[in-house]
């Protein structure tokens, strides 16, 4: 299973990527929304985990572009956000974001959400 992880926070991205790889996922990384879209078109991941606040193109703009793309519109996306202000929440709701986690979160929460979305019950153990 291929997972694309887009987050400009290098340490967090590496931590998540390492844990996912330890659990058998093929992980690709991007540090902004523009690169995430380009990489998603190239690799066609099974799921995209993407932060909201990123340079060049933020996660919600990238989310909207992906969901309006014929090639990627069915790609499951988990939005990660440290922003829980009213404007961010309104935009998340307006875009009909189905999967969302607020930072900080436990890696197990993210892992469980990924497994749930992918329909896997592999009982993998996440080291956190």
Image (cartoon, grey):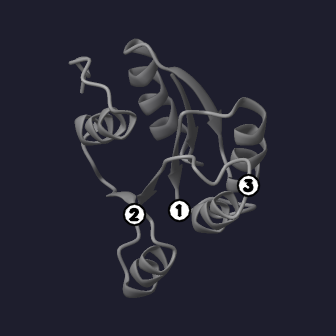
Could you tell me residue 72's position as x and y percent? Answer: 67, 49
Residues at marks 2 and 1 touching, judged by CB atoms closer than 8 Å: yes
Q: CA separation, marks 2 and 1? A: 8 Å
Distance, label 3 to label 2, CA atoms, is: 29 Å
Q: Residues within 10 Å of mark 2 (few under 14, many from 20)?
A: some
Quadrant containing the C terminus is: top left
Secondary structure found at label 1: loop
Question: Residue visible at 73% across and 58% down?
Answer: 69
Q: Is residue 26 above or below residue 29?
A: above
Q: Secondary structure at mark 2?
A: loop
Q: Sequence-wise, which precedes: disc 3 or disc 2? A: 3
Left or right: where 108 falls relative to 33: left
Q: Earlier in the sequence, mark 2 or mark 1?
A: 1
Could you tell whether 41 is left or right of 64 in the image? Answer: right
Disc 3, SS: loop
Residue at mark 2: 82
- Image coordinates of residue 86 in percent, x first then y, are 37, 86
Residue on which the image places disc 1: 52
CA–CA distance between discs 3 and 1?
22 Å
Q: Nearer the viewer, mark 3 or mark 1?
A: 3
Q: On residue 70, which mark appears?
A: 3
Where residue 83 sits, quadrant-wise, is: bottom left
Mark 3 and mark 1 in contact? Answer it, CB < 8 Å. no
Closer to the chain start, of discs 3 and 1, is: 1
Assess disc 3: are there few (<14), some (14-19) or many (≥20) residues with their C-alpha within 10 Å of its C-alpha.
few
Task: Point out residue 98 in the picture as x, y percentages from the top left corner.
Answer: 40, 61
Which mark's residue is nearer the viewer, 2 or 1?
1
Residue positioned 30% across, 53% down in the render: 104
Using a 10 Å C-alpha cutoff, classify the residue at mark 1 as few (fewer than 14 neighbours), some (14 to 19) or many (20 or more): many
């Amino acid at each position: 299973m291929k997972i694309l992880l887009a987050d400009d926070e290098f340490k967090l991205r590496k931590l998540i990527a390492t844990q996912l790889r330890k659990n058998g996922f093929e992980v690709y990384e991007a540090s902004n929304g523009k690169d995430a879209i380009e990489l998603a078109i190239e690799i066609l991941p099974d799921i995209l985990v993407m932060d909201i606040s990123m340079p060049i193109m933020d996660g919600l703009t990238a989310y909207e572009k992906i969901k309006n793309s014929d090639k990627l519109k069915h790609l499951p996306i988990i939005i990660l956000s440290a922003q829980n202000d009213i404007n961010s929440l309104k935009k998340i709701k307006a875009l009909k974001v189905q999967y969302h986690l607020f930072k900080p979160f436990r890696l197990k929460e993210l892992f469980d959400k990924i497994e749930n979305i992918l329909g896997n019950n592999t009982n993998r153990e996440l080291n956190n």
